Amino acid sequence: MMFHITALIASGIGQYGVSASTSPRADLATMYTRLSAEIGKYADEGANIMIKNGWMEKPPQSVDHEDLAKA
């Protein structure tokens, strides 16, 4: 679940970047940039959790049903 949340965070930051680059209003572009920085801090905390638990090195795997059937 953590992997998916960090992927959504990255997507959100990308969307803010697109919004900031296409907005004709300078105040909105400034707001999008500020929000991207705030979300970046949140994403950094998530990355630290994933590194601490060893999830960053090995992404989520599907369940091995054949191994489960043997048990």
Image: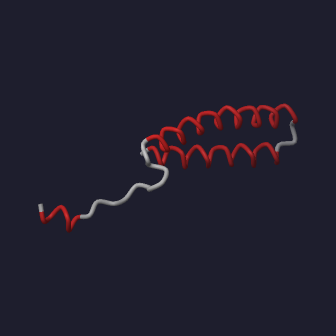
- Number of numbered discs overlaid on the protein picture: 0
* Image position of 52 with respect to 34: above or below: below
Q: Residue furthest left?
A: 71
Residue 51 image point, x, y percent: 49, 44
Quarter of image, res 35: top right
- When asked about the image quadrant of residue 67, the answer is bottom left
Left or right of residue 49, residue 68 in this image: left
What color scheme is it?
A: secondary structure
Which residue is painted at 68% across and 47% down in the image?
15
- The percent position of residue 8, horizontal first and vertical second, equals 55, 46
Q: Is residue 53 rendered to the left or right of residue 44? A: left
The residue at the point 56 percent across, 35 percent down is 45
Give the side of residue 53 with respect to residue 6, left or right.
Answer: left
Q: Is 6 on the left or on the right of 34, as rendered? A: left
Report the quarter where the C terminus lies.
Answer: bottom left
The quadrant of the image that shows the N terminus is: top left
Q: Position of residue 56 (x, y in %)?
A: 49, 50
Q: Quadrant of residue 64?
A: bottom left
Q: Nearer the viewer, residue 26 or 69?
A: 69
**Residue found at x 71% / y 35%:** 37
- Depicted 6 relative to depicted 60: above or below: above
> Looking at the image, which residue is at 48% across and 54% down?
57
